[in-house]
Structures are given as C-alpha cells and as structure tokens.
Image (cartoon, rainbow, N blue to C red):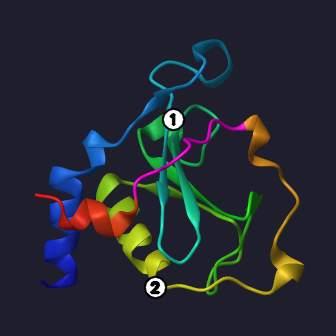
Amino acid sequence: MTHLEKLKQLKEKWFEELSWDKLDEEVYGPDARQAWVKLDNGFEVSIVRHQHSYGGSKGLYEVGVFRNGSMATPKGWDDEVKGWLPPLLVCDTLLKLEDSEYHDNTTIHNRSVEVMKLHDHPPSLKSLINSN
C-alpha cells in the first residue's frame, strides 16, 4: 500500500471515527474537540481543534506529542506541536510520527498530562490502519 493510499484510508475510514471528546465550550469555543492516538514507538498524540489551537478558528487541527506523560519534541520538529493541519495532513503526521524518534531528555518538557483528558487505552495507529 502506498503512502497516499494509507493516508486516504486513514482519513476516510478512521479520522472521523476517532473517539472525539467534546471540550468545554465556555473555555474552548463551539465545536471544540480532542482525540488521542497511541503509537507503537511510545508517543501519544493529542489531536485538537478549538478556538485557541493553531488553525482551530479555520476548522484545522493541531497535534501535540507526548511521551511518558510529558510533551516531547520528535526528531525533525522544532516544537512539541504542529498546527494548521487539515485531516489528511493529520493522518500524514501520524504516519510519519510512527516511524520517528524523540530527542534526548533535554527536550522533553515537564508539562503534565493530568490537566488533559487522556483515554486509558487510546487505539494504536497500526490497529486502526489494519482494521477494515
């Protein structure tokens, strides 16, 4: 399966079927939502869209990367988050993150996940790609 075929499959069969949590409208605005995905390399990825996220006011998404309960900067990134992403680019980012590593501990930040709503067992990306 080509990279583009994987992207299309993820977008069509998976993206909207994620377990989306509705976020507090008074804080995050209308239609604010968040989902979590666990990758096999240990990253947990938050996908959000709200009035304070990068691109959220335009209907686009922001992804944030976590490892061991703290925000992490994957190799090749200059921050822990990427924004202004349409659903297809969110899927592309997840596929690339699955094969990525993280920088050493000096770039892992002590921002607790406790303030965020983390599912006990977010689905793995491979299980989502392989489920038909």
Query: Residue at left 33%, top 53%?
Result: 87
- The numbered dot on residue 66 is none
Q: Is the magenta stretch mostly helix, strand or loop?
A: loop
Disc 2, disc 1: CB below 8 Å?
Answer: no
Residue lying furthest front in this view?
120
Answer with left or right where residue 94 lies relative to residue 8.
Answer: right
Residue 47 shows in this picture:
yes
Q: Identify the residue under disc 2.
A: 99
Q: Name the disc covering residue 57, or none.
A: 1
Residue 72 higher or lower than 41, as above or below = above
Magenta span:
116-123
Whether residue 24 is in magenta: the answer is no
Give the position of the C terminus as an image quadrant. Answer: bottom left
Q: Position of residue 45 (x, y in %)?
A: 55, 58
Whether residue 89 can be seen here = no
Q: What residue type is labelled 1?
A: Ser
Q: In this view, does 63 lie to the left or right of 130?
A: right
Residue 70's image quarter?
Answer: bottom right
